[in-house]
Image (tube, helix red, strand yellow):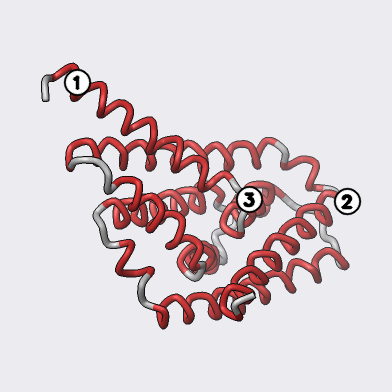
Amino acid sequence: MDLPSFASTSLLAGLEGFALGGGLIIAIGAQNAYLIRQGVRGERVYLVATLCFLSDALLIAIGTAGIGAVIASDPLLRSIAAWGGAVFLITYGAKSAYAVLHPVPLDWQAGEDSGRGIWKIVLTTLALTFLNPHVYLDTVVLVGGVAAQYEAAERLYFTVGAILASALWFYGLAVGALRVAPFFQTNRGAQVLDGTVTLVMFAVALSLIKGELGG
């Protein structure tokens, strides 16, 4: 393959990776809802964005390396992740539902300055990411399956494109959440935020349970 042809094919691979990666993460799921929540609360939002991005990049790399199909083919692992994720999401959703009934205006400065609970934020972010089987099926299996059509060099560009889309989305979401934070410093804003998080968490949990029950 001559250089111009290789450059053209590599660029197309990178663009396809970017488009596919972006399309998969834009849907507001549990992970994105939590990032938005942390952003409007001013609680370690860039830490959460970084953890989301690094986790996504790892899963994309695993998928494009061809390991995704192995993970997806183990029904026991998928079942454990599904039920564990559902329990976690329902618990977290119930906590947010309680907050809707007992709203507390968000104190942005207090959230930003406090160093307490950092490990809770880290563990929650990782749980929302890795306890969701959809993450493996979409990011690992689907992205990996599309990447398999490319040769090794072009697959690298595809992978970089998908990872770049992930970085732009998560950090963009963090910045956007910070910009709308003033609204959520009111009782009504706090209720809207926690209500949205509750609905998202319960919806994702329900999809996991239906998947396991064959519904």
Left or right: residue 143 versus residue 25 is: left
Q: Nearer the viewer, residue 39 or 106?
A: 39
Q: Nearer the viewer, residue 109 or 120?
A: 120
State which tag comes first along the sequence, 1 or 3. 1
Residue under label 2? 188
Question: Where is residue 20, by image quadrant?
Answer: top left
State which tag comes first along the sequence, 3 or 2. 3
Residue under label 1? 5
Identity of the residue drawn at 34% across and 55% down: 58
Local crowd at mark 2 within 10 Å, few (<14), some, or many (≥20)?
Answer: some
Q: Is residue 67 above or below residue 14?
A: below
Please state the horizontal and vertical placement of residue 64, each as a whole percent of the image: 29, 51
Residue 176 marker: none
Identity of the residue drawn at 65% across and 40% down: 178
Q: Quadrant of the N terminus?
A: top left
**Residue 215 at least partly seen:** yes
Residue under label 3? 28
Identity of the residue drawn at 68% across and 47% down: 40
Q: Quadrant of the C terminus?
A: bottom right
State which tag comes first along the sequence, 2 or 1. 1
Q: Secondary structure at mark 2?
A: helix
Please state the horizontal and vertical placement of residue 183, each as a whole percent of the image: 80, 42
Q: Nearer the viewer, residue 58 or 117?
A: 58
Left or right: residue 61 versus residue 15 is: left
Question: Where is residue 90, by image quadrant?
Answer: bottom right
Amino acid under disc 2: Arg
Identity of the residue drawn at 46% across and 56% down: 138
Please state the horizontal and vertical placement of residue 76, each as a whole percent of the image: 41, 83
